[in-house]
Image (tube, helix red, strand yellow):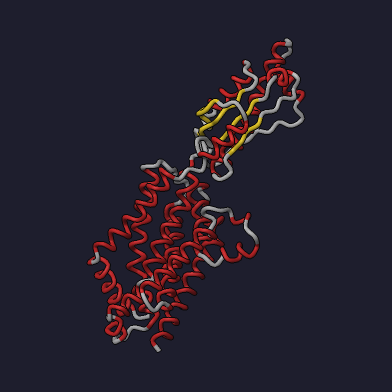
């Protein structure tokens, strides 16, 4: 490759980008918008679910159990009803997301260790179901342990010694890297990959076809630059813009949302560089195959959607069928998001993410070569 040819092409592409203020605003503004939306609107846990209560026992222990649910902050009592049918009607109308039915003689059943309550959850809302189900189970377990401890205390037995002696298994749980389970800490490392993929593929997919529609492709072809040099010259300015966008997202996430960065910034930069180059190469390949900007935009959106679904950002890869896991390996975001979470959250080094880095290197090289050959074929 001729450095002089590439340098001229880079200056030409950079000049075009800098002149298009709307495009610059879109490229730099979209990451901010996505981060703010995910940072404030996206929540993995749902709190303060409106709860309808049917208390048919009306005793101290039933009221304590309801209060325990409220104290967990996952539920807020919104309605006091008389029957299970009324609770289901309230859920159907959307007035509440959950219902609690406490049967008669609840206190007596608790003393006899066979008490049951019914928790109804709105199954049309998956987030509410998951949060409500987990919270109700934990509150019931905690309340049962509390009642057991009170009974032991009243019997005059040493609680700690007896409890430890009678427990066959004692489980101590420690959550690493994010002990307080803050949602944005989970989201940000993957969101960086999602934003970079969106920018790189959608913008690169328009590069060649835009030149063709504007009629500026002929002067470029009249230059002595080879197809591979043309591809590199078009990638570099977009790559720099994507790196600037990544810096904005990282800075806002770390300093505004308080997400700690535990790894090496230099390693993260090189991983991001490889990922952006891979995504830009993929976008350029799509641009060489498209006949119009509308078609290129459609290709970009399809690949972006598949990248979101199969990259592991939203859904765990190990829960997918083998065929879908194979498909996920066709997208560079799969490898970058996995490496991003390892470096960002865990603070690991290259020795733990070298395989993902190597795949991104190969992916970037192969896809740029394929894009240049496809460009040459379309010219012929």
Percent position (x, y) of residue 373?
Answer: 44, 82
Percent position (x, y) of residue 244?
Answer: 33, 58
Q: Residue at x 42, y 69 (%)?
A: 298
Q: Is residue 380 left or right of residue 132?
A: left
Position of residue 346 relative to residue 244, above or below, is above
Q: Nearer the viewer, residue 282 or 54?
A: 54
Classify the position of the C terminus by image quarter. bottom left
Q: Is residue 70 left or right of residue 35?
A: right
Q: Nearer the viewer, residue 78 or 264?
A: 78
Q: Residue at x 74, y 32 (%)?
A: 169
Q: Nearer the viewer, residue 172 or 152?
A: 152
Q: Residue at x 37, y 79 (%)?
A: 229
Percent position (x, y) of residue 10?
Answer: 30, 73
Image quadrant of residue 100? top right
Position of residue 285 relative to residue 258, above or below, is below
The tally of labels here is 0
Position of residue 266 relative to residue 256, above or below, is below
Residue found at the very far left of the displayed protein? 19
Image quadrant of residue 91? top right
Classify the position of the N terminus by image quarter. bottom left
Q: Is residue 70 left or right of residue 60?
A: left
Image quadrant of residue 81? top right
Percent position (x, y) of residue 164?
Answer: 73, 24
């Amino acid at each position: 490759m001729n450095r002089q040819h590439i340098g001229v092409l880079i200056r030409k592409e950079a000049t075009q980008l800098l002149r298009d203020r709307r495009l610059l605003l879109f490229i730099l503004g979209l990451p901010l918008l996505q981060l703010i939306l995910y940072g404030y609107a996206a929540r993995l846990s749902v709190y303060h679910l409106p709860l309808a209560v049917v208390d048919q026992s009306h005793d101290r222990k039933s009221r304590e159990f309801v209060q325990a649910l409220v104290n967990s902050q996952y539920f807020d009592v919104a309605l006091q009803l008389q029957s299970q049918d009324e609770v289901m009607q309230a859920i159907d109308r959307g007035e509440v997301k959950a219902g609690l039915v406490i049967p008669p003689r609840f206190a007596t059943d608790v003393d006899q260790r066979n008490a049951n309550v019914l928790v109804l959850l709105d199954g049309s809302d998956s987030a509410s179901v998951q949060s409500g189900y987990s919270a109700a189970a934990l509150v019931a377990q905690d309340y049962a342990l509390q009642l057991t401890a009170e009974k032991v205390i009243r019997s005059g037995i040493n609680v700690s010694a007896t409890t430890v002696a009678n427990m066959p298994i004692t489980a101590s749980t420690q959550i690493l890297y994010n002990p307080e389970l803050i949602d944005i800490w989970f989201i940000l490392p993957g969101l960086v990959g999602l934003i970079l993929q969106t920018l790189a593929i959608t913008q690169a997919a328009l590069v060649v076809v835009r030149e063709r529609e504007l009629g500026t492709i002929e002067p470029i072809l009249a230059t002595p630059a080879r197809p591979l040099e043309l591809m590199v010259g078009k990638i570099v300015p977009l790559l720099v813009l994507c790196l600037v966008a990544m810096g904005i997202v990282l800075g806002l996430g770390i300093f505004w949302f308080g997400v700690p960065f535990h790894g090496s910034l230099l390693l993260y930069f090189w991983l991001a560089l490889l990922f952006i180059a891979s995504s830009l190469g993929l976008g350029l390949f799509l641009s060489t195959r498209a006949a119009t900007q509308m078609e290129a935009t459609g290709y970009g959106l399809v690949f972006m959607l598949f990248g979101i679904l199969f990259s592991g950002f939203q859904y765990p890869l190990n829960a997918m069928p083998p065929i879908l896991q194979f498909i996920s390996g066709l997208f560079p975001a799969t490898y970058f998001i996995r490496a991003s979470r390892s470096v960002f959250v865990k603070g690991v080094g290259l020795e733990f993410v070298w395989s993902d880095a190597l795949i991104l290197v190969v992916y970037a090289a192969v896809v740029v070569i394929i894009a240049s050959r496809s460009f040459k074929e379309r010219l012929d």
